[in-house]
Amino acid sequence: MNRFDRLLWLLTLIGLLIRVAAVFLLNDYRAPITADHGIVAHDLAAGKGFTGGGWLGPEQPMALNTPLYPLLLAFWLWIGIPLPFLAVELAQAALLALMVYLIGKVAVQIFNHVVGTVSAIAIAVYPPLYRYFVSRFHRPS
């Protein structure tokens, strides 16, 4: 492993630590705002299918959101673990931390090591990437 790869993995670890800290500091996982995706996920876990949260009313079919993310949320609700949204937020934090490494690698392939390093640092510490994409379960407004 070369020096640049080690730096990217270090930045990825820093990004992961920031995101995990944000999960616990923001404390959204206990009673998250689950508009749109979360409402559909609750209905899926309850066996009602893709319903709720739409303009047609709470019990009407809903096809305004992509199906994969509500299915992922419904899975965590369905398995019955305590604090299911904590598990979701930690999984999202880990996946988004990997973005630091990937962006750095892509930037170095397209541009150079300086751009790759700056890009990875920016992705690791950019606040909206750990506020809205780790601890929100609906479209940010």
Image: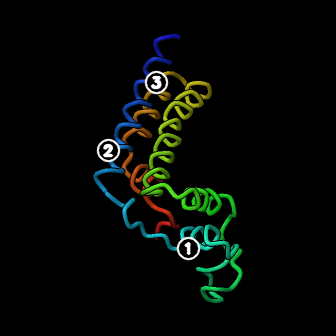
Mark 3 or 1: the one toward you = 1
Q: Please state the total of marks drawn on the protein image.
A: 3
**Coloring scheme used:** rainbow
Please, what is the three-letter code of the amino acid marked with disc 1? Ile
- Residue 39, labelled with which disc? 1
Give the structural element (helix, strand or loop) at label 1.
Answer: helix
Residue 79 left/right relative to 9: right
Q: Residue at x 56, y 30 (%)?
A: 107
In terms of depth relative to the viewer, which is nearer, 68 or 118?
Answer: 68
What separation in Å lies between label 2 and label 3 (alpha carbons)?
18 Å
Q: Earlier in the sequence, mark 1 or mark 2?
A: 2
Considering only vertical position in the picture, is 97 above or below 136?
above
Assess disc 1: are there few (<14), some (14-19) or many (≥20) residues with their C-alpha within 10 Å of its C-alpha. Answer: many
Q: Position of residue 121 (x, y in %)?
A: 40, 34
What separation in Å lies between label 1 and label 2 (alpha carbons)?
26 Å
Please, what is the three-letter code of the amino acid marked with disc 2? Ala
Please, what is the three-letter code of the amino acid marked with disc 3? Trp
What residue is pinned by disc 3?
A: 9
Q: Residue at x 61, y 80 (%)?
A: 52
Give the structural element (helix, strand or loop) at label 3.
Answer: helix
Mark 1 or 2: the one toward you = 1
What separation in Å lies between label 3 and label 1 (alpha carbons)?
36 Å
Question: Residue 21 lies in what quarter of the image?
Answer: top left
